[in-house]
Image (spheres, rainbow, N blue to C red):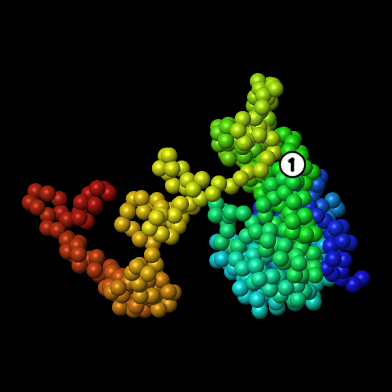
Amino acid sequence: MPKLQGFEFWSRTLRGARHVVAPMVDQSELAWRLLSRRHGAQLCYTPMLHAQVFVRDANYRKENLYCEVCPEDRPLIVQFCANDPEVFVQAALLAQDYCDAIDLNLGCPQMIAKRGHYGAFLQDEWDLLQRMILLAHEKLSVPVTCKIRVFPEIDKTVRYAQMLEKAGCQLLTVHGRTKEQKGPLSGAASWEHIKAVRKAVAIPVFANGNIQCLQDVERCLRDTGVQGVMSAEGNLHNPALFEGRSPAVWELAEEYLDIVREHPCPLSYVRAHLFKLWHHTLQVHQQLREELAKVKTLEGIAAVSQELKLRCQEEISRQEGAKPTGDLPFHWICQPYVRPGPREGSKEKSGARSKRALEEEECGTEILSKNKQKKQLRNPHKTFDPSLKPKYAKCDQCGNPKGNRCVFSLCRGCCKKRASKETADCPGHGLLFKTKLEKSLAWKEAQPELQEPQQAAPGTPGGFSEVMGSALA
């Protein structure tokens, strides 16, 4: 059977999916996908998988895909991060029998993606991306899709999307934020970029960004003309988002825990999901928040969730007929979490710094990490400008800073290895290596009293040997 492409692939294989759960690292595992499908999701992605690890590690393949095969979990798209065409295709070939399409992650903006050189940090390397998509399109029996972030310029974003389409991409998910828009600096996603891409390409497009309720989904479909809408954080705080419902948190928490018992996953995933679901309630019951962080069994997590449920129900009985105050509905209802902006999230009253130095100083200094902020509080004169840091001469062998007075121009570790092998000394490092004989002679020279037996004093036993002899007698 020939491989389906474009709109035919979307309508027949993906069954015209419009409500899509995003690929989320450690969060879109099988149990969560099944929960989401029960409540309106029509298509799910696996968490992002590392292509190189997937190729070389059989246990990684087993834990992240092969053991999660479930007839209910279709249609399903497996997402990989990669930066090498051959490795990407090898990983995709190992996964293609367990899914309906392979997705290339070109949208991850996190520091780990920058260090690993994948995700959104490949968006300027168009030649490499063309080769990756083209090779996958030729070799795979399932379609290849892409998830991207936008450029600040709409026209460049459009040309980027058209390049991927021409290379063989059969479905494009567009996150309407740039790679710099992340965490507390996310801001609103640009649906204008998504709309422009949709008009410019002849393949299905999914929109991602600004989705917190079903009304947002419908408005996005109407305003952008896309084929489907993808949700990440909105889905984590309310898995029933695509149903247009906001049920009591404990209903979905209990249902999720039941699924986990049938389809186990790491406890860290479960805990993270419960933190998202109970987010607003845990702001009220701080003690239970601490307990949820400490429990080390699934039943322990279920017990904390049950206690949260009982406390909420007690509060409901006390507030019978009451209406929610302010903009926030009752905290025990599944509802979106609005991420605070840079200045909203800072704790100005207490003088504490926010998690990632959200506020920028008036002098225009760069935003510092939490650890750097602590160091600067201890030493106000400390600078993190790399141009002002002293330049160290590098070790000839390993590249670490070498000792300033090392006679071999090496660091301490390499100097020690070389000096011990060559029985040579390095006064600069203070490493003086001697043979066992040399050490023995030096030790005897330092203790002259051991060279000759001491003369016995008048009226006392003889020397050392005589004393030991009388003792043994």
Image position of 152 with respect to 33: above or below:
below
In this view, the residue farthest toward the left is 458
| The N terminus - image quarter | bottom right
- Would you call the spot at circle 1 few (<14 residues within 10 Å), some (14-19), or many (20 or more)? many
Residue 268 appears in the picture as rendered: yes
- Judge by depth and name the residue closer to the eye, 271 or 121: 121
- Judge by depth and name the residue closer to the eye, 136 or 4: 4
Query: Residue 181: x and y, percent?
Result: 58, 58
Amino acid at pointer 1: Tyr
**Left or right of 271, for residue 386:** left
Q: Residue at x 74, y 56 (%)?
A: 223
**Left or right of 303, for residue 419:** left
**Left or right of 395, for residue 40:** right
Query: Residue 297: x and y, percent?
Result: 65, 39
Q: Residue at x 41, y 54 (%)?
A: 361
Q: Residue at x 12, y 58 (%)?
A: 455
* Count of numbered tags: 1
Q: Residue at x 79, y 64 (%)?
A: 204
| Residue on which the image places disc 1 | 256
State the SS at label 1.
Answer: helix
Q: Quadrant of residue 237?
A: top right
Query: Residue 154: x and y, percent?
Result: 65, 67
Residue 297 appears in the picture as rendered: no
Query: Residue 444: x and y, percent?
Result: 22, 66
**Left or right of 360, for residue 11:** right
Image position of 209 with respect to 101: above or below:
above
